[in-house]
Structures are given as C-alpha cells and as structure tokens.
Image (cartoon, rainbow, N blue to C red):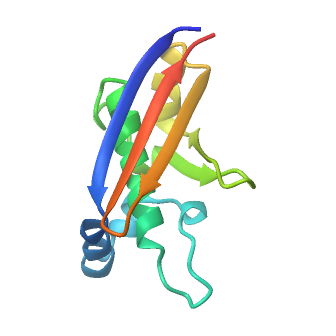
Amino acid sequence: MAIIGIGIDIVEVKRIQNAVTRRENFLKKIYTTEEIRMTPRGEFRFQELAGRFAVKEAFFKAIKTGWRRGMTFSDVIVLNEPSGAPYVKLTGKAKDIAQSLGATDIFVSISHTADLATGIVIITDQ
C-alpha cells in the first residue's frame, strides 16, 4: 500500500456558521442533504458542518488539484459510520479523479473544539 496523497485543513466554526446564516445558497453549494444533520431542537450542528468542510478541503489538497477541474464541494460527501467514524463518499469528477490516481482507500479523521474544526484525508492505493 502506497500513499497517493495527504491533505489537512482547519476551519473556524464561526466562519461556517456565518456562511450558513448569511449566504442563502451556501448549504446547497457545499453540502448534500445527507450531510446536513440537525440537533433534536432543529438547529444546525455548526461544528459538524465545519468538520465536514475541512475534510472536503483536505480531500482537494490530497488529490493535488484544489477544487478545479470541474469538481464541486458536493462531489465529496462526508458521512459517518454507525460507530460515528467519518468516511468519504465520492461522486462526479471527484470520483473520476480519485480513480484515475489509483485510489482504493480514503482515510478520514475530524476533530473540533467549540471554535475550530480540522479534517485530514489520506488517500492510498492497494
């Protein structure tokens, strides 16, 4: 197994909160409906959204393209296993580029505090 790419990103939770509340299309542009989870009171989980955003940015760094070449943020879907462990599901151009690089596994980790969220992505081949 060889590492194809590594990416890491850190995001201020407040930045995501401001974008969600002030920019009408931000959620639709960045996240899929399956990525957006609400609290039992119907409030956004801004720390979780920030962590997912950080993973998307980290993925773009790991494949060494940024989000150019026709990719969109919603091509990189960050979800959770039943255990809570995060994972990435790729669609569209992100999936095509990852396959062209020979990616077979994508390892993801997210961490956050009240103010900051970070995501790391490691892409490997067989």
Q: How many numbered badges does the structure rendering display?
A: 0
Q: Is residue 91 above or below residue 1?
A: below
Q: Could you tell me residue 98's position as x and y percent?
A: 49, 24
Q: Nearer the viewer, residue 24 or 106?
A: 106
Residue 84 visible from this viewpoint: yes
Residue sitting at 48 percent across and 73 percent down?
Answer: 45
Q: Could you tell me residue 64's position as x and y percent?
A: 31, 23
Q: Nearer the viewer, residue 92 or 7?
A: 7
Residue 70 visible from this viewpoint: no
**Residue 88 in which image quadrant:** top right
Q: Could you tell me residue 40's position as x and y percent?
A: 62, 86
Q: Nearer the viewer, residue 3 or 30?
A: 3
**Residue 114 in which image quadrant:** bottom left
Q: Is residue 1 above or below residue 22?
A: above
Q: Quadrant of the C terminus?
A: top right
Q: Could you tell me residue 38's position as x and y percent?
A: 56, 78
Residue sitting at 57 percent across and 91 percent down?
Answer: 41
Q: Is residue 126 above or below residue 67?
A: above
Q: Nearer the viewer, residue 122 or 63?
A: 122
Residue sitting at 55 percent across and 39 percent down?
Answer: 91
Q: Quadrant of the N terminus?
A: top right
Residue sitting at 24 percent across and 80 percent down?
Answer: 22
Residue sitting farthest toward the bottom: 41
**Residue 7 in which image quadrant:** top left
